Amino acid sequence: MYGFGPCTPLGLQFLASVREAMPAPPCVRARAFPTFRVSQAVFRDGSVGALQHQHVNKLESHIMMKKLLSACLLSSALLVGCGGENNEADVEGCEHLQEGPSAAVTASASATGTLPAVSNDHKRYDITLPAGSGGNVGSVSFAAAEASDYVFFLGSNVTLKVTNASGQTVSFEESATSSAQCTNIKGRYVAPLEVGTYTLTFGPASESSVSLVIEETAHADEH
């Protein structure tokens, strides 16, 4: 799965075994670290020759290894920083869509007034959608306790709209109808939310219900 790359264990072992034979980059050889030092010597027959002292090669190899290891650490940090939180959220979303715990909620046919509430409490909400003229549609409320990115996982391919207290639609940073983590995710929406109460509207859709799991990306692994 991981192959034989410079930052894999096999790659590092290989680099360590051949580091003595590794040349330094041309710029390093030409300026800061010459590969050898030349000095004159008088031999027994009276001739004058040149001796090459290659003791600098070990220093060059050490510097090269340090640079390669630094690159490995940096690439690992970038992988974690760029994809770690979202992957944890997807793991949590799959787990709760599959195993719960669950709570049944009947959405409101109106997007105004007092709405049934859902939360990012590591729970699956099985939401019943009332029948409408253009399909089944319903709304619930969600209170964001802190400013963060929230991921809304749906168990059905149902459209989702998020509006703030002023009625303005929140633009999604990401939206998809699947996840590589599991097949249970049929909708995946990432929204940047400030502290406050939001309205989640599902549909119109042909489905009469939809399962919902909400995860905050920064706290996806907290139970």
Image (cartoon, rainbow, N blue to C red):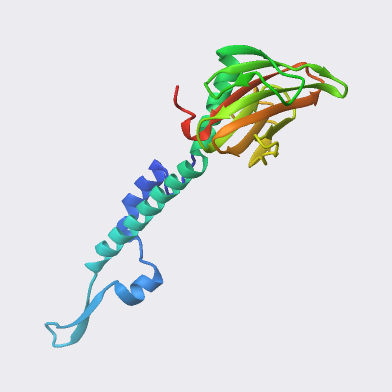
Residue 25 x %, y %: 39, 68
Residue drawn at point x = 40 percent, y = 53 percent: 71
The answer to whether residue 205 of the structure is visible from this angle is yes
Picture quadrant of residue 126: top right
Residue 158 x %, y %: 74, 26
Query: Is 64 on the left-hand or right-hand side of 144?
Result: left
Picture quadrant of residue 206: top right
Vertical order, 173 against 123 (above or below): below
Residue 197 x %, y %: 60, 30
Query: Is 131 on the left-hand or right-hand side of 127?
Result: right
Question: Quick one: 87 or 130, which is closer to the camera?
Answer: 130
The answer to whether residue 1 of the structure is visible from this angle is no
Question: Quick one: 121 or 154, which is closer to the camera?
Answer: 121
- Residue placed farthest to the right in the image? 133
Residue drawn at point x = 69 percent, y = 26 percent: 186
Picture quadrant of residue 102: top right
Question: Quick one: 112 or 200, which is closer to the camera?
Answer: 112
Vertical order, 81 against 163 (above or below): below
